[in-house]
Amino acid sequence: MEQKPREIVGDFYTPKGNIAIVASRFNEFVVDRLVSGAMDALVRHGVKAGDIEIVRVPGAYEIPLACQNLAQTKRYAGIIALGVVIRGATAHFEYVAGACANGVLQAQLATNVPMTFGVLTTESIEQAVARAGSTAGNKGSEAAMGLIEMINLLGKIND
């Protein structure tokens, strides 16, 4: 009889531990919608509001350093990065968006703390608003759900 491979899959049970949300202040009126979506998803999945800490940074470029420092404290089961970078007439968009994404990736690999990337990179403010809960879902909520799944997946892998 042939054996099946073992499959390890994350789930959406209430994660143990504190959660940090790192949110940029730039484009705050959109970022606040992402934060609300993330908070709602976390609380709906059993995370107590008192176990969530929101850390505000100036802009998306500063998100990775805050994520890394939070992870190094070992007080957080996971971290959600939220922000908005909107393309303009200069190359600034590429530098900021790429550095932010790569920085969050490097921070989670260096610290082994799961982090999800809910930083919107859009062509217009209208696209950003749509992705922050108006017509195209809420990417903050999606980032929170991804974090819950990754916390639980890593828990299973490391058991």
Image (cartoon, rainbow, N blue to C red):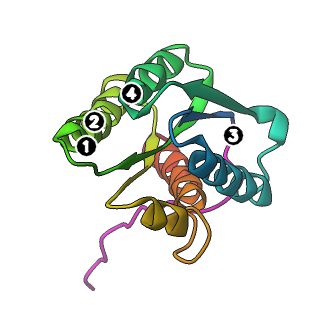
Residue range in magenta is: 1-16
Residue for badge 2: 96
Mark 1 lies on a secondary structure that is: helix
- Report how far apart the C-alphas of labels 2 and 4 lie in the structure: 11 Å
Mark 4 lies on a secondary structure that is: helix
* CB contact under 8 Å: marks 2 and 1: yes
Of callouts 2 and 4, the N-terminal one: 4
- Report how far apart the C-alphas of labels 3 and 2 lie in the structure: 32 Å
The amino acid pointed to by label 2 is Val
Residue for badge 4: 64
What is the x, y in percent for residue 116? Answer: 45, 46
Of callouts 3 and 4, the N-terminal one: 3
Residue for badge 3: 16
Q: Residues within 10 Å of mark 1 (few under 14, many from 20)?
A: some
Of callouts 3 and 1, the N-terminal one: 3
Q: Residues within 10 Å of mark 4 (few under 14, many from 20)?
A: many
Quarter-wise, where is residue 74 in the image?
Answer: top right
- Report how far apart the C-alphas of labels 3 and 1 lie in the structure: 36 Å
Nearest to the observer: residue 30 or residue 143: 30
